[in-house]
Image (cartoon, coloured by chain):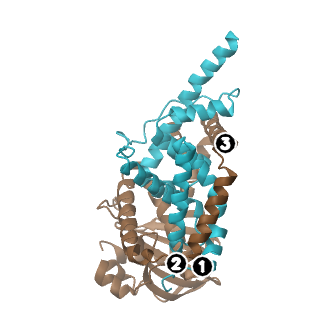
Chain colours: A cyan, B brown
């Protein structure tokens, strides 16, 4: 049970290449969604992967490498925001999970992928983050909490409220969509 | 369970974040409630469609040039030598992780959030079992229960002798191979490893932090529950006033429950108040 030593040279690269590099595309897509700017996404992913390489001896084989990389990406992103003098994303003023909405309507069938992503992009960023990390990246609540440095309860409440907001947006865009169709 | 309860837990249910017992309660409710079935189906469809829409958005893809350049740069950096900074800051990372987890769990134990918090603890316990008892690859070297008792509290002292080294269960004997305290995912566990039913099985005890104790009004006996299978391991748990106790191992759930039944009561009494 000795401390793991940092792998070096070829060995380090081989381990990193096998474990971390396969996640590069998905990590970039995540960064691209958050940043909405290709040069910024490229900078963010490059810094994330460099930090991951430097810290790779701390990664525990058998655990979720994508979640580990996502956590680093969020740290880098948070640090970059602070360095630019932009305030970090604020916590919910009300994190109660019990903000239940009435039974939700079914997802409108006529929605396109663009409609859905458009609606997702219109809800506040803190809700987008948890929805994308949960539904797209399929991280566990704990992995999301670790990545975003927020409590588990906040992950749950943001998911709950974020999905309600997403449905509201989808309903609105369906109306607009139907209206456009009807008027066409 | 009422419709309102199901709605509040629906997202966690779909995310497979609930304990087995809670899942069963929801499933029982769904058998007789078409409205909640429709609600859950709609939520599941939204999740699936979001994932598909995201994955098919080609404008989010990295350019081949970027991937090639980054790969080359990473490879060059890897061959320049190992990182030295990691060991200096490792202790700080461990401390930060511990504080983060403590704060997270402390907050999470409030109200309904204890379900998710317990689920997270069960996953951590399984992670400790796998990484310590089976694969011997913890980042931090385990310490003796004696040392842990001096540093962290009397509960570790109790576990030096409880459960006894040889336990008789309804399906066969269990023998203690090792007792120590170890850290996994920033969380400290008292860890007792058994040889049981031809496999290594872990008994893991961890404190509930944040000064928030789970109320146990009038409970004289532990309530042992199955947490189902987590990461290909059977998990059984019960709680005391200050700790969560987990049993984890790659043995049938029923056999693990027998082991828990055999040791839970004396353990529960021994840990009372410490």
Q: Is label 2 on the same chain as label 1?
A: no
Q: Is residue B258 above or below residue A86?
A: below
Image position, residue A12 (x, y; %): 60, 76
Image position, residue A168 (x, y; %): 53, 28
Q: Is residue B251 visible?
A: no
What element does badge 1 sit on? helix
Q: Residue at x 48, y 78 (%)?
A: B139
Q: Residue at x 52, y 44 (%)?
A: A34
Q: Residue at x 58, y 50 (%)?
A: B15
**How would you rate the neighbour count of disc 3 (Cα within 10 Å): few for under 14, some for 14-19, many for 20 or more?**
some
> What mark, if any, has residue A181 been given in the picture?
none
Residue underneath mark 3:
B48
**How would you rate the neighbour count of disc 2 (Cα within 10 Å): few for under 14, some for 14-19, many for 20 or more?**
many
**How would you rate the neighbour count of disc 1 (Cα within 10 Å): few for under 14, some for 14-19, many for 20 or more?**
some
- What chain is tagged by disc 2? B
Is residue A109 left or right of B160 when viewed as pictured?
right
Residue underneath mark 2:
B82
Judge depth for marks 2 and 3 and give the one in front: 2
- Contact flag, marks 3 and 1 (Cβ < 8 Å): no
Whichever of labels 2 and 3 marks the residue nearer the N terminus, that label is 3
Asked whether B195 or A17 is in front, the reply is A17
Disc 3 and disc 1: Cα gap in Å?
41 Å
- What chain is tagged by disc 3? B
> What mark, if any, has residue A9 been given in the picture?
1
């Amino acid at each position: 049970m000795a401390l793991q030593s940092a792998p070096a040279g070829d060995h380090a690269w081989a381990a990193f290449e096998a474990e971390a590099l396969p996640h590069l595309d998905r990590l970039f897509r995540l960064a691209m969604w958050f940043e909405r700017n290709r040069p910024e996404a490229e900078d963010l992913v490059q810094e994330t992967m460099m930090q991951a390489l430097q810290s790779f001896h701390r990664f525990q084989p058998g655990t979720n490498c994508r979640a580990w990389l996502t956590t680093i990406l969020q740290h880098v992103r948070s640090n970059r925001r602070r360095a630019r003098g932009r305030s970090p994303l604020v916590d919910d003023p009300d994190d109660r999970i019990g903000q239940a909405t009435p039974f939700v309507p079914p997802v409108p069938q006529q929605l396109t992928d663009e409609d859905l992503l458009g609606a997702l992009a219109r809800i506040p960023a803190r809700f987008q983050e948890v929805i994308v990390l949960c539904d797209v990246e399929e991280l566990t609540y704990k992995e999301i909490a670790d990545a975003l440095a927020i409590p588990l309860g906040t992950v749950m409440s943001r998911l709950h409220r974020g999905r309600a907001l997403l449905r509201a947006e989808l309903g609105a865009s369906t109306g607009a969509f139907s209206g456009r169709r009807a008027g066409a | 369970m009422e419709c309102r309860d199901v709605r509040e837990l629906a997202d966690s249910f779909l995310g497979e974040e609930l304990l087995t017992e809670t899942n069963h309660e929801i499933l029982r409710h769904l058998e007789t409630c078409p409205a909640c079935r429709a609600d859950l189906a709609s939520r599941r469809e939204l999740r699936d469609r979001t994932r598909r829409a995201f994955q098919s958005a080609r404008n989010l893809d990295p350019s081949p040039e970027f991937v090639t350049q980054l790969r080359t740069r990473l490879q060059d950096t890897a061959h320049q030598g190992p990182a030295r900074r990691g060991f200096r800051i490792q202790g700080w990372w461990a401390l930060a992780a511990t504080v983060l987890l403590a704060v997270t769990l402390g907050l999470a134990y409030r109200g309904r959030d204890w379900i998710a918090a317990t689920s997270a603890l069960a996953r951590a316990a399984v992670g400790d079992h796998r990484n310590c008892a089976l694969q011997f690859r913890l980042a931090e070297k385990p310490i003796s229960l004696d040392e842990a008792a001096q540093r962290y509290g009397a509960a570790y002292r109790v576990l030096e002798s409880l459960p006894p080294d040889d336990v008789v269960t309804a399906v066969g004997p269990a023998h203690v191979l090792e007792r120590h305290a170890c850290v996994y995912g920033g969380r400290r566990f008292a860890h007792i490893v058994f040889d049981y039913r031809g496999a290594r099985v872990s008994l893991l005890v961890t404190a509930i932090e944040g000064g928030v104790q789970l109320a146990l009004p009038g409970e004289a006996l532990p309530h042992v529950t199955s947490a189902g299978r987590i990461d290909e391991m059977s998990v059984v748990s019960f709680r005391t006033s200050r700790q969560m106790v987990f049993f984890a191992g790659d043995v049938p759930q029923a056999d693990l429950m027998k082991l828990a039944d055999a040791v839970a009561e004396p353990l529960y009494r021994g840990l009372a108040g410490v």
